[in-house]
Image (spheres, rainbow, N blue to C red):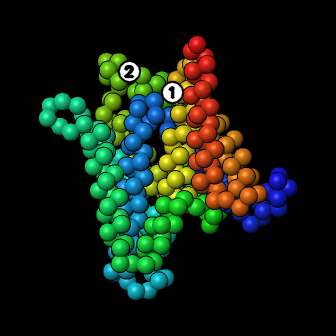
Amino acid sequence: MIENFFDSWSLFQHAYLAGWFIGLLLSLLGVLVVARDQIFIGAAVSQASMLGIAVGLWLGSALSHDPHSWWHSDFFHSTMGGVFAVLAALLTATGSRGSGRETHEAITGWVFLASLSLSILLMAHSPIGAEEINRLSASTIIGARQTDVWVFAAMFVATATLLFTYTRQALLLILDPAMARAVGLRVDVWNRLLAVWLGLVVGFSIHVSGVVFSFASLVLPALVAKNVCRETRHLFVVAPAVSLATGILAFVLANHYDYPPGQMAAACLSGLVVGAWLFRWLRAR
């Protein structure tokens, strides 16, 4: 099994490396999402990114018939996915309880459903566009390029550096926003910055790895860490470790049994969540 994986390295090394870096990157941001019980925001932002890609595909077909034009490039589609993901993240970050304004849950649900329906409607009469949306929905990492590896590696390093530098502020945002405000932390600004970065990361990740793998990497490693760690700060170490270890195992299994790597990773992470729930139950007895 391991030998077969190494034999495939020359063909799929960029896909493997990109997948692992995406997993590491999203698991770090997932700690902030899961610890604040905003898991559904990840689904809404992911779906909004799909809508952005669908809009990019629709604009490309409407503005140019040259398949080699910029309007048909992966960069344009990724950019549109990132823009829509950022807008969705900012929109969900503005919801508040009380004062007649909609809650986070209401806005998040609206973003998810509106994005899901509109992306399907936009591509309903475009066979090529519908195929691309289905490909992303099916979550495939095969086809990632060396550029993707470097981009996600840089984003991971930047995210890890910022979280290490501002660990205290991040913990305050997670554990006690009221205290964060009391000590002078501009919580609204931090939330918007986090929303922008989350949108960018999710938007570009989905175009490379698809929805299933991206959403699973965002939520499931952090859920595992949340159930096995006693202190919140340890989540920032355990979640990426879980993501990387599971990603390596999943890609080896997927290569050996000829399964899609994204779904295999999501399935393995889902199994680990069940194990983490069991571990927490046994520890509480």
Label 2 sits on a secondary structure element that is loop
Nearer the observer, disc 1 or disc 2?
Answer: 2
Front residue (pair 48, 1): 1
Inter-mark Cα distance, 1 to 2: 14 Å
Mark 1 Cα shell of 10 Å, populated few (<14), some (14-19), many (≥20): some
* Picture quadrant of residue 237: top right
Q: Residue at x 39, y 55 (%)?
A: 47
64 displayed left or right of 283? left
- The residue labelled by disc 1 is 167
16 displayed left or right of 230? right
Mark 2 Cα shell of 10 Å, populated few (<14), some (14-19), many (≥20): few
Image quadrant for the C terminus? top right
Q: Position of residue 148 (x, y in %)?
A: 59, 60
Q: Amino acid at mark 2?
A: Asp
Q: Position of residue 86 (x, y in %)?
A: 37, 51
Can I make out residue 173 in this image?
yes
The tally of labels here is 2
Q: Amino acid at mark 1?
A: Thr
Identity of the residue furthest to the bottom in this view: 65
Q: Position of residue 219 (x, y in %)?
A: 50, 40
- The residue labelled by disc 2 is 176
Q: Is residue 219 above or below residue 37?
A: below
User: Does label 1 or label 2 sit earlier along the sequence?
Assistant: 1
Q: Residue at x 35, y 58 (%)?
A: 116
* Picture quadrant of residue 120: bottom left
Q: Residue at x 63, y 64 (%)?
A: 142
Front residue (pair 14, 260): 260
Identity of the residue furthest to the top in this view: 285
